[in-house]
Every structure is written in structure tokens, then in C-alpha cells.
Image (spheres, rainbow, N blue to C red):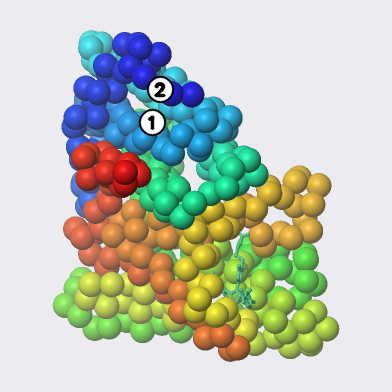
Amino acid sequence: MKLTRNCLGNIGKMLDFYSQFNPSPLSIKQFIDFGLSACERKSFIFLRKELPVRLANIMKEIHLLPENLLKMPSVGIVNNLYITSFEEIIHFEKVDVNETTLDKFCQALIKIRNRHTDVVQTMAQGVLELKESHDVDIQTENSIQYFLDRFFMSRISIRMLINQHTLLFGGQLNGHSRHVGCIDPSCDVIGVIKDAYENARFLCDQYYLASPELRVKQHNGKFEQKLERSNEIRIIYVPSHLYHMLFELFKNSMRAVMEHHGCDSDNYPPLEVLLVRGKEDICVKISDRGGGIPRSQTDHLFKYMYSTAPQPSKSDAHTVPLAGYGYGLPLSRLYARYLHGDIVLLSCEGYGTDAIIYLKALSTEANELLPIFNKTSSKFYRTPV
Ligand SMILES: O=C(O)CCCOc1c(F)cc(-c2c(C(=O)NCc3ccc(C(=O)O)cc3)noc2-c2cc(Cl)c(O)cc2O)cc1F
């Protein structure tokens, strides 16, 4: 379905208007400082412009996708979700700022967040529809990889803005929680590591009837910084993002260890986690002895086309609990990169794999990394003549 201005009508003009602006990246420090001052009007004024800008920037890229992908039914569904949400949000562009419009804005954000809940799975279904209906050349595969990294990063950033506003002003009592929206100003990294491990272990035990133990070490480089209450390593971060990354990596390590050592083994090599605070980086290294994968295959694990597998149907979801639709690792890397961190995989075939999560140690350096729609990004999609 070719999306031209006339079929988008006035929306096309509004998309052109808002996509002229670059998204404005916020740092974790700005999120925290803004959240502590908590002025709903200021947040509304910022978001009623910034959300349409971020939506328009990525919607313009959807329209540049390779024709074959764009015409897949599931991609059409996602595109229509974005058009509907874009229309709803630009409605607030000219309204007066009062209690009523602030409440309606919050409700609209919650409605939009719910509408887009399954967008990742729906896009994965679109890639599957493409794989099953067309031969995909390397140029198309590269365009899809480039697009989905940017599309899912944009989605992470939009949901972050929506979550902050609805948590701070949506009426739910924050209780005694010291969290600022979805940010924990003093996130206990070891605690999240243990949570993620226990939950991955539960799935592993369900399927393999056993699981590798966990050993955690930490090294807190002594740099000039506020004296920690104890030697604990704490970070200003989004615990749910950190949990998502760790849960994914623990599932992969457990799957490798259990498959490599066979189910009849009575003792499995433990997963070793090293947590280090440096001046610039906080690193979480997960080392397993799961047999590793050849270097030639490691990159494939981050590839959407390579890892798109038929969706595990509900019935057999319990059969391979550690497997999803294959986007777990690329999405986890996007969560890390969203605040200028990263995830790196180092595998030694025949022995095991190290997965390292890098996070920014300083909140002033943990800035949003946002895709910007412009001539450079558009060129990436245009197939060379
Ligand atoms: O479904 C999802 O979302 C999870 C999708 C993901 O599913 C995987 C998975 F959990 C684990 C592995 C795997 C293997 C393996 O499988 N080794 C056996 C083999 C030997 C040779 C070759 C080859 O020659 O190609 C390939 C594999 N070895 O190390 C890892 C491994 C991978 C990651 Cl990302 C990690 O954080 C820790 C690890 O220990 C591969 C996965 F793919």
C-alpha cells in the first residue's frame, strides 16, 4: 500500500510539519530533575510537541521501507496504529491548558500505550510474512535491520516519555517509593541481577528440571564520588530496562549450559557474574560454560531476519520457555544503547560465552539515543540505482 499525501490527507501535511523537527534527547539527570519538580503543565507543554515529533520522525521512515515489507498485512496494522495515535496526540496542540485537558491528555497517553502493547510481536509477524512470501536480498535485509533498530529504539523512547508523565501525574499514588517515575535514583544493581536470575532459573527448572547456580562478584573502583553507604554499587537507572537485559541474557546462558551439558548431568557449571563500577562505565559480565558459538554465528543473534522464528504458539510456549520470537537479544541491546550503554557478546566456541552489559556510570552521560529522520537516514533506504 503506497502511502501518498492524498491517502493520508491532512495527516500527511501534519507528518511533514512535525518530522521537520529533530527529537530532543533527555538525559537521566533531566528526567530526574524534572520529575522532582513535577510540574504537570510543563510536562504537558513539552510532550504535546515532543511526542508528535518522535512519532512523525519514525512514521516517515515506515513509509520508506522496502515495498515488499510495507505491503505485509502486519506492517499495515502497525502503520495504522501509529496514524491513529499521531492523530490523537496532535489534537492537544492548540487546546487550552487546564485541569480537564491535563486529565484527558493523561488518559490519551494511557490509551496510546495500551494500543501499542503488541507492536514488537506484530512487526515480527510482518517480517515472518515477508520471509514466507518473498526472497529477501541482502540489501532488503540490511534495510530491515537498520529500520527495526531505529523503530524499536523510537518505541522505547516514546514509552519512556509516556511512562514518566503517567507515573508522575496519572494519579496512582507513588507511595513511599523513592522512584521518580520509572527511574530508580539508587538502583541496587545486584538486587536486579538476583531477581532476573531467579526468574530465568524458574523457567529453566520447569523445562530442564535443573539449572546452573549463580556466583556474583563485584568490584567497586574507588573513584572520587559520593561515598556509597556501603560498598554496594548503585546507579540512577530504569530498573525495568536493566531487568529486561539481564533476564534475556540469563535465559540464553541457561539454555546453552543445559543443552551443552545434557539433561542427565548432575552438576552444571555455574553462571559467573562480575559487576564493576568504573569512572565512566558500569559493567555487568555474565560468563557461562555453555559451549559457546562460532564467531561466524555470533552476529546473527542480533539479526531480526535471522532470528525471526514462527511465534511460539500459546500451546507450546511451555515447551521451549527460554525461547521467544528471537528479538530478545537485539531488543536488550537497544535498551542498553538507549541510554548510551551497550551489550557485547564474546563467545569462545567449545567453551562458553561472556555477555557484557555496559551502562553509563554518570547520569549526566546517560542521554537518550534517538533516531533522527533526515536525508542521511532516508538515503539508507533508497536502493542504489
Ligand atoms: O528465542 C530467543 O529469543 C532466544 C534466541 C537465543 O537462543 C540462543 C541461546 F539461548 C543460547 C545460544 C548460545 C550457544 C549455543 O546455542 N551453542 C550451540 C551452537 C553451536 C554451533 C552453532 C553453529 O555452528 O551455528 C550454533 C549454536 N552458545 O552460547 C550461547 C549464548 C548466547 C547468548 Cl546471546 C548468551 O547471552 C549466552 C550464551 O551462552 C544461542 C542461541 F541462539
Residue labelled with disc 1: 63
Ligand 1 in which quarter: bottom right
Q: Given the image, on which type of amino acid does mark 2 rest? A: Leu
Q: Residues within 10 Å of mark 1 (few under 14, many from 20)?
A: some
State which quarter of the image contains the C terminus.
top left
**Can you give x and y, in whole percent of width and height, for residue 326 in the image?**
59, 56
Q: Residues within 10 Å of mark 2 (few under 14, many from 20)?
A: few
| Secondary structure at numbered mark 2 | loop
Q: Are marks 2 and 1 in contact (CB under 8 Å)?
A: yes
- Identify the residue shown where x is 65% and y is 53%: 309
**Can you give x and y, in whole percent of width and height, for residue 152 in the image?**
42, 45
- Identify the residue shown where x is 36% and y is 35%: 64
Q: Which sits earlier in the primary sequence, circle 2 or circle 1? A: 2
Residue labelled with disc 2: 3
Which of the pair 3/337 is nearer the observer?
3
Q: Quadrant of residue 261?
A: bottom right
- Is ligand 1 less than 8 Å from the beta carbon at label 1? no
- Identify the residue shown where x is 63% and y is 40%: 133
State whether residue 57 is above or below residue 267.
above
Which of the pair 11/6 is nearer the observer?
6
Q: Quadrant of residue 99?
A: top left
Q: Is residue 169 left or right of residue 110?
A: left
